Amino acid sequence: MATEEPDLSGPVKQHLKKYLHQITTEIDHLLITIEDKDCCILDEFEQVHGVFNNLHMTASSYYLTAYLSPFTDSYQALSTAIQHLSERKHGALIAVQRKEPLSSLMHSGIPVGGSVSYALLESVFYPGSPLHDGAVLIEDNSIISAGNVLPLSRQTTGRENFGTRHRAAIGLSERSDALVLVVSEETGRVSFALEGKLYPVHQSGLI
């Protein structure tokens, strides 16, 4: 069930190399600074951590597009919806079917049968909507159903602080090749689950 890794494009590769060079520079500076025992290096560690986060999220945003594009032409509408939901801190859970059927792994969903649009996705996840707590299932360019219940992750170690949406996203990705998008209701942060792992996404890289 391993996902074929896409090749990094030239501009993305250059962008990532820029971050890696910046990290190398910061670490070289740390090695010099740490010799001064009277100097606090917590600020320097925070800077390196920030660069690592930007590197991780930039790469995740690129791979998210690469993993989705062979299976749906509606990436723009999907990314616009995710961006708006993130800005408003409206929690969301969206499963994108890839090669493996997902119907047997989810239940209690309500058929929708509409084309993927950001307006429809935003209305589904609007707080108070009867379907906002469940997952949307997308196949090709259609929203098949909403309000779906997904299997929770079998793994608990290191995931004690994950909410139900994130555990459900990981759970479905453990049992299928689906890509599952999550928007946190608490922070507005965007992640995607694939092959049992959760990756943060840079919101500005979605559109």
Image (cartoon, rainbow, N blue to C red):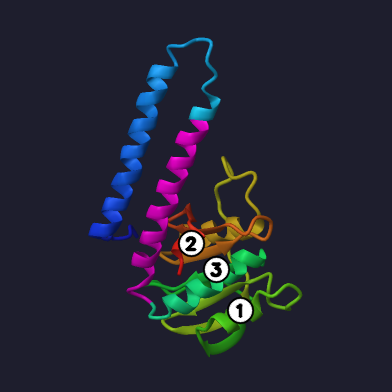
Magenta stretch bounds:
45-71
Q: Label 2: few (<14), some or many (≥20) within 10 Å?
A: few
Earlier-in-chain disc, 2 versus 3: 3
- Tell me if residue 32 is in the magenta stretch: no
Between 82 and 12, the one nearer to me in the picture: 12
Question: SS class of the residue under badge 2?
Answer: helix
For marks 3 and 1, the one nearer the N-term is 3
Residue 146 shows which numbered tag? 1
Q: Which of 39 and 131 is in front in this view?
A: 39
Q: Closer to the camera, 187 or 101? A: 187
Q: Can residue 48 be seen in this snapshot?
A: yes
Please tell me which residue is depicted at 53% across the width and 10% down the height of the picture. 38
Give the crowd class for mark 1: few <14, some 14-19, many >=20 residues within 10 Å. many
Considering the numbered disc 3 on the image, is that residue within a helix, a strand or a loop? helix
Q: Tell me what residue is drawn at x 55 percent, y 80 percent.
A: 118
**What amino acid is labelled 1 in the image?**
Ala
Give the image quarter of residue 183.
Answer: bottom right
Task: Say which of marks 3 and 1 sits in front.
Answer: 3
Q: Distance between the residues labelled 3 and 1?
A: 19 Å
Residue 186, quarter of picture: bottom right
How far across and how far down the image is residue 103, in percent? 51, 76
Residue that label 3 marks: 83
- Between circles 2 and 1, the one closer to the viewer is 2
Residue 178: give x, y in percent of width and height. Answer: 44, 67
Query: Disc 3 marks which amino acid?
Result: Gln
Secondary structure, magenta segment, majority class: helix
> Is the Cβ of the residue at disc 3 closer than 8 Å to that at disc 1?
no
Res 71 label: none
Residue highlighted by disc 2: 204
How much space separates mark 2 and mark 3, taking CA atoms? 8 Å
